[in-house]
Image (spheres, rainbow, N blue to C red):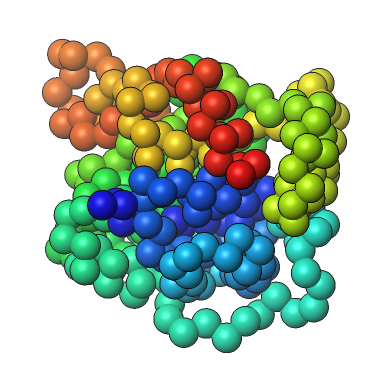
């Protein structure tokens, strides 16, 4: 029986690859996709998710709901230099991003938790604003979630948004602080793990040419800008797969190794805004370690599953 999933996304380019992976994984059933401001403004995220679901035509169309247009306290910081102004490397459908949206993301998150009674997995691919708002609104309902997997944080590697912060936790450090201290069953997939895997441009070109499908053409064209950014900033012609790794870790938990820790995020610092800090010291009695922090991924298995599903 496929496991119920909800994806919360700031539908950028690696989010799009993660959504394709999730919608093409028969082990799970993506019941809903909620959007949050991050890589781009939330209206564009919602448009991008609608475009991707139309492109993929999954047998069961997920409910799509729009969420927070800005972080809890901070001004929104976006990343057009990474994902393009439209969030999909310039290939999103033109025209106004605002779509009629039935329900708000926070209500959908809470409804899906209540419906699935401890079986729902939420994969958070962007800032944690929607989850923090759901916690503030009805904590007793959000506690019905089975598991939350959050792509975020950087612990023993430098940040990708300034020297010490990872983007998702930098954009909304207050939301990350709330969710990581809530005691909810959270698994964090940090840059320490996601930067262990790179998708090279040559591989995308090779595979896309062999699979002349609309999805393959989207992957080829939609990742071009994202990969050029990595060439300019990281020195390789390819791209990190942050969000697909978070989805894979939720679908196949055995491909990652985790350690329990108490994890928090800096919300006050100027230099250290969004910095994630893990307490591994056994004798430290400050706070109970409730977060499962990923420390390693089985690259080969992940890449096999990723390519098998992406190029179907
Ligand atoms: O730091 C990488 C994360 O921030 C990814 O989820 C990317 O899509 C952006 O949201
Ligand atoms: Ca993301």
Q: Where 161 sits versus 111, above or below? A: above
> Left of 126 or right of it: where is 234?
right
The spot of residue 224 in percent (x, y) is 82, 42
> Is residue 233 visible from the viewing direction of this image?
no
Front position in the image: 59 or 306? 59
> Left of 189 or right of it: where is 77?
right
The spot of residue 127 in percent (x, y) is 50, 51
Front position in the image: 175 or 111? 111
Which quadrant of the rendered structure holds the C terminus?
A: top right
Q: Residue at x 15, y 13 (%)?
A: 283
> Left of 246 or right of it: where is 57?
right
Q: Residue at x 34, y 66 (%)?
A: 109
Q: Residue at x 45, y 18 (%)?
A: 298
Q: Quadrant of residue 142?
A: bottom left
Q: Residue at x 44, y 72 (%)?
A: 63
The mark total stands at 0
Q: Quadrant of residue 53?
A: bottom right
The spot of residue 177 in percent (x, y) is 36, 45
The spot of residue 47 in percent (x, y) is 65, 70
Q: Where 47 sits versus 26, above or below? A: below
> Is residue 1 visible from the viewing direction of this image?
yes
């Amino acid at each position: 029986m496929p496991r119920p999933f909800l994806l919360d996304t700031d539908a950028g380019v690696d989010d799009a690859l993660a959504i394709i992976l999730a919608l093409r994984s028969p082990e799970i059933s993506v019941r809903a996709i909620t959007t949050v401001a991050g890589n781009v403004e939330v209206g564009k995220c919602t448009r991008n998710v609608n475009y991707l679901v139309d492109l993929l035509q999954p047998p069961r169309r997920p409910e799509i709901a729009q969420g927070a247009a800005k972080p809890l306290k901070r001004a929104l910081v976006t990343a057009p230099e990474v994902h393009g102004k439209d969030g999909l490397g310039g290939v999103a459908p033109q025209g106004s991003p605002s779509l009629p949206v039935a329900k708000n993301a926070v209500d959908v998150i809470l409804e899906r938790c209540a419906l699935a009674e401890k079986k729902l997995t939420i994969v958070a691919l962007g800032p944690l604003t929607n989850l923090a708002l759901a916690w503030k609104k009805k904590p007793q309902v959000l506690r019905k979630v089975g598991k939350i997997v959050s792509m975020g944080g950087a612990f023993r590697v430098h940040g990708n948004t300034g020297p010490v912060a990872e983007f998702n936790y930098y954009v909304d450090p207050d939301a990350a602080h709330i969710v990581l201290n809530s005691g909810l069953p959270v698994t964090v997939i940090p840059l320490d793990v996601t930067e262990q895997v790179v998708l090279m441009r040559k591989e995308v070109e090779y595979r896309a040419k062999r699979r002349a499908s609309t999805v393959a053409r989207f992957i080829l064209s939609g990742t071009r800008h994202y990969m050029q950014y990595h060439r300019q900033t990281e020195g390789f012609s390819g791209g990190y797969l942050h969000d697909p790794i978070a989805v894979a870790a939720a679908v196949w938990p055995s491909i990652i190794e985790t350690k329990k820790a108490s994890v928090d995020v800096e919300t006050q610092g100027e230099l250290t805004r969004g910095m994630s800090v893990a307490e591994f010291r056994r004798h430290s009695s400050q706070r109970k370690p409730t977060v499962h922090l990923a420390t390693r991924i089985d690259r080969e298995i992940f890449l096999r599953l990723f390519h098998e599903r992406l190029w179907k």
